[in-house]
Image (tube, rainbow, N blue to C red):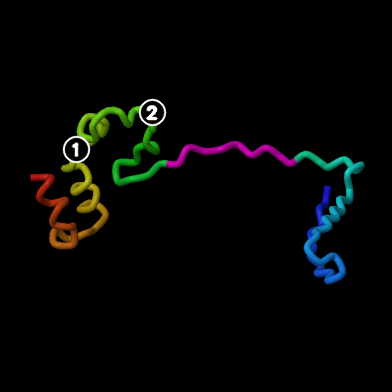
Amino acid sequence: STVIVGTVIDQSLQDSLRVTIVATGLGTVQAKGQVRPVSIVKTGTDNLAVENYSSLDLPTVMRTGRKRESEVEAMKQSGMEMLDIPAFLRKQAD
């Protein structure tokens, strides 16, 4: 259906309000949309799947299955110089 909304000020109503709703297309049949498959999005330097939010009761240290060294190694392999890697990542990898 299509709902059309509009506003009109009528001074003759004084402190009253009149509401008119116009809805069209109520009897027409709409075509169903195509269902598209959803792919899993991989993120991060380790190509891990998106975080599982049901495990957020665990501390972050216990939730992550990757090591900091792998983040720095992935950056090195992509052509980054050692000083291009942020200091906090370099220190965590040591």
Magenta residues, dominant SS class: loop
User: Hey, which quadrant is residue 41 in on the image?
Assistant: top left
User: Hey, which quadrant is residue 29 in on the image?
Assistant: top right
Q: Is residue 57 magenta?
A: no
In this rendering, position of residue 40 left or right of residue 81: right
Element at label 1: loop
- Give the magenta range: 33-41
Labelled disc at residue 92: none
- Disc 2 marks a residue whose amino acid type is Ser
Q: Is 83 in front, or is 28? A: 28
**x and y percent of residue 66 in the render?**
23, 35
Pointer 1: what residue?
A: 67
In this rendering, position of residue 36 left or right of residue 24: left
Element at label 2: helix
**x and y percent of residue 20 in the render?**
85, 55
Pointer 2: what residue?
A: 54
The label nearer to you, 2 versus 1, is 2
Q: Is 77 in front, or is 24? A: 24
The C terminus: image quadrant? top left
Image point (37%, 36%), residue name: 51
In this rendering, position of residue 6 left or right of residue 52: right
Image point (37%, 44%), residue name: 43
For marks 2 and 1, the one nearer the N-term is 2
**x and y percent of residue 27 in the render?**
92, 42
- Disc 1 marks a residue whose amino acid type is Lys
